[in-house]
Image (cartoon, helix red, strand yellow):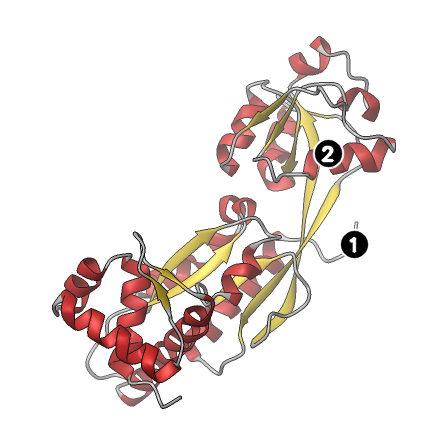
Amino acid sequence: MTGFQLDHLQTLVALVEEGTFEAAAQRLRVTASAVSQRVKALERAAGRVLVQRSNPVLATEAGSVVLRLARQVALLDTDAQTALHAGGVEKAAFSVAVAVNADSLATWFLDAVASVAESGAVLFDIYREDQEHTTSLLRSGTVMAAVTSTANAVQGCSVEPLGSMRYRAVCTPRFQARHRIAPGDAAALARAPRVDFDRRDELQADFVRGTSGRDAAAAQARHFVPTSSDFARAVALGFGWGMLPEQQCESELGAGSLLELAPGEYTEVRLFWQRWNLTSTLLDTVTEAVRRGARASLHEFGRR
């Protein structure tokens, strides 16, 4: 394997992000043939096939390794250029790819990084993914950092605790009356219709199991609403009961438009920040903003 050329690495990033040779060529202002030649040269240097020639183009396992390197080189290059030209010619904003779980995205994350976006130094490329699955995007090199529930650091990354989100089991008063759910009656929750985010969402089922010691009924009606704000709205409209982050239901509980089905009980989802283990001014700036936002919005682990 020989060293990689910078323009070849930049071409790989453009190809994977744009999805086709033609779109990558347009972005780089070269011909599609030039894109193809650069990728072939990169594959010769790597000694591996780096992309699947599909539509859209996808990185292979080896391609993900080189893609991650390409994005790290781009980040470090931007940091160096910024340091060299501080106070000089204004540079274009750098795109920082981050994976964030849907509930964090809907509640605290955007507020946390708003000042960084407003500064004009960073363009955020946010991938919404379940907190259990955000680390897969780190491993593939798709993102530089992630809000995740995984405490074990991905190879090449550092990890630090952010805090926990607390979820309460809630429904409308009308739903509670219709399904005759007494406060604390977890067994009734196992029978009443519920709202799940998607078919991977186990939060509601785990709450029933943890509070009643039984599994949800096999025939339990389930609504699937795969966006955080619409999930909360579905619960508020009486589709079913669901586990909502405290930030999404506190005012409604205070107003009486939602009721807590298991007072004093909650599910705690611990969140961590994983990022590339690189010395980078831009990534440090994003990380510090996320820390401040988490301190303001999340609970310390285990503290009631």
Q: Where is 127 relative to 189, above or below? A: below
Q: Is residue 237 left or right of residue 242?
A: left
Instruction: Label 2: state its secondary structure.
Output: helix
Q: Quadrant of the N terminus?
A: bottom left
Q: Percent x, y for residue 221?
A: 65, 19
Q: Can you name the residue that lies furthest to the right here?
A: 213
Give x and y (percent) for residue 10: 28, 74
Circle number at residue 144? none
| Residue drawn at (69%, 39%) of the image | 203
Residue 204 is situated, as x and y percent measured from the top left of the image, at 70, 34
Give how far across and how far down residue 45 sits, in percent. Answer: 34, 84
Please tell me which residue is depicted at 30% across the width and 65% down the height of the picture.
120
Which residue carries the number 1 mark?
303
Number of other residues with Cα within 10 Å of mark 2, as a class: few under 14, some 14 to 19, many 20 or more: some
The answer to whether residue 264 of the structure is visible from this angle is no
State which quadrant residue 50 falls in. Answer: bottom left
Q: Is residue 32 above or below residue 253?
A: below
The residue type indicated by label 1 comes to: Arg
**In which quarter of the view is residue 126 placed?**
bottom left
Measure the C-alpha gap from mark 2 to mark 1: 24 Å
- Image height of 130 relative to 193, above or below: below
Local packing at callout 1 (Cα closer than 10 Å; few below 14, some 14-19, many 20+) is: few
**Res 21 seen here:** yes
Task: Tell me the kind of residue under disc 2.
Answer: Ala
Instruction: Select label 2 or label 1 by which is in front.
Output: 2
Residue at the spot 48% in from the left edge and 83% down from the top edge: 279
User: In the displayed structure, does residue 121 sit left or right of residue 241?
Assistant: left
Residue 202 is left or right of residue 49, and the answer is: right
Reply above or below: 7 against 49: below
Helix, strand or loop at label 1? It is loop
Mark 2 vs 1, N-terminal side: 2
- Mark on residue 205? 2
